[in-house]
Amino acid sequence: MTSLRRISRTTAFAAIALLANGFAHAAVLPDDRADALYHRYDGGGVTIDGPSVLLRKKFAEKYSVSANYYMDMVSSASIDVMTTASPYTEERTQGSLAFDLLQGKTQYSVSYTLSDESDYTANTASFDLTQDILGDLVTVSFGFSQGWDEVRRNGDAAFEETVDRRNYRFGLQLIATPRLLTGLNYEVITDEGFLNNPYRSVRYLDDTSARGFSFQPELYPRTRTSNAVAINARYFLPHRASVHGEYRYFTDTWGIDANTASIGYTHPWGKRWIFEAGYRWYDQSAADFYSDLFPRADAQNFLARDKELSTFTSHMFSLGATYELSSLGWDRIQRSTVNLFYDRINYQYDDFRDITAGGAPGTEELYSFDADVFRLFISGWF
């Protein structure tokens, strides 16, 4: 299911971002490091959990190789599923390889990722270049990704569609003062092919139905272009603490406009603990061809009832803790940490209704739900 796939990938990328320390950095090879992670998402009738393993290794202070394996199990009885289908479970696996080359103040990175599940296969190749300039006070980055996806439908061997994806990105990081880092990121994403969910349906008014409405398959445009720009900053406080924030604006050719604002605080305690807290607000408008209830069958050229394309707002509160372990007595392990992060997310939909609650078509109560996300990982530097 497309919405579940989106949640799953969001969880995966958030986990990987945590392992990579997230914030933009200068052209320098990552440390030799190994991470083992377990994540769990639970909300809206959907449970997603699984492990991830990441390994990085440098060679001759010039080359770096990393490999990542990620798996999640999806169990879904979401509102989308319960209204038109039956609960289901599925498994997704993802593997990636990356290679970095450092030449002076320039870093080149290439990577390949393969993600596979019963009805969707995604291949992605990426190239990134990072360059330090102006006495290392400014870091400029460019990147490009090409994706080739294959969409299938379980139970229908004849169904097979493709999706072509391209991502162009630019980043700029400035050391504004000894305590202040600022950044600007811009990206353009183009998608072409089968972009809707082969299982999902839209509903429309139907006087011949006892419920007052009936369903028909969704139909999306076969192209989409998205633009996003983000500004971020991190300010280092005394005693190794820091505060950071980001604002991001997103718009696309489907008529969706979205705003994201986040703020966070990091506070070391003693020699071994680091605590983190954060808040993120997200708000978006609906796609031009979205409706919770269409006036009739085939009411327009394109039809969507995916709640992820509706008008909605979300609030996320985050807490995290990192503990540096005592020496393990292993010659190859220089230091290690245990890290636990928890997110509480609330989703409020403005024009997507819970038809399982009953009521006249178009008057059902608006849908909302809460989700919990846990991430536990162990990191070791060698």
Image (spheres, rainbow, N blue to C red):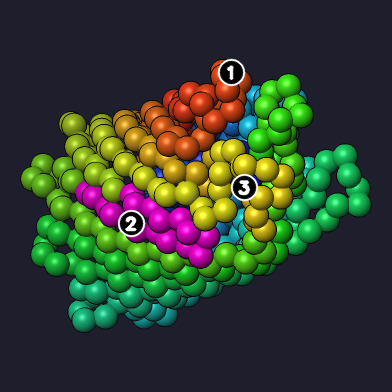
Looking at the image, which residue sits at the far front? 207
The magenta region covers 244-260
Quarter of the image holding residue 217? top right
The image quarter containing residue 52 is top right
Q: Which mark is residue 304?
A: 3
The amino acid beneath tag 2 is: Arg
Q: Residue at x 46, y 55 (%)?
A: 256
Please tell me which residue lies in front, 127 or 348: 348
Q: Position of residue 373 (x, y in %)?
A: 46, 30
Category of crowding for the residue at label 3, using alpha-carbon neighbours closer than 10 angstroms: few (below 14), some (14–19), many (at least 20): many
In the image, what residue occupies the spot 18% across and 67% down? 175
- What is the CA distance from the residue labelled 1 to the residue labelled 2? 37 Å
Residue 256 within the segment the image draws in magenta: yes
**In the figure, is residue 301 to the left or right of 167?**
right
Q: Which mark is residue 248?
A: 2
Write the residue at 11% across / 42% down.
239
Whether 99 is among the magenta residues is no
208 or 318, nearer to the observer: 208
Q: Nearer the viewer, mark 3 or mark 2?
A: 3
| Residue at x 39%, y 53% (from the top left corner) | 258
315 on left or right of 158: left
Residue of label 1: 358
How crowded is the residue under tag 1: few (<14 C-alpha within 10 Å), some, or many (20+)?
few
Mark nearer the viewer, 1 or 2: 1
Instruction: Reply above or below: 350 against 145.
Output: above
Q: Is residue 334 visible?
A: no
Res. 278 visible in picture:
yes
Residue 6, horizontal then vertical, whole percent: 57, 45
Q: Amino acid at mark 1?
A: Gly
Report helix, strand or loop for mark 3: loop
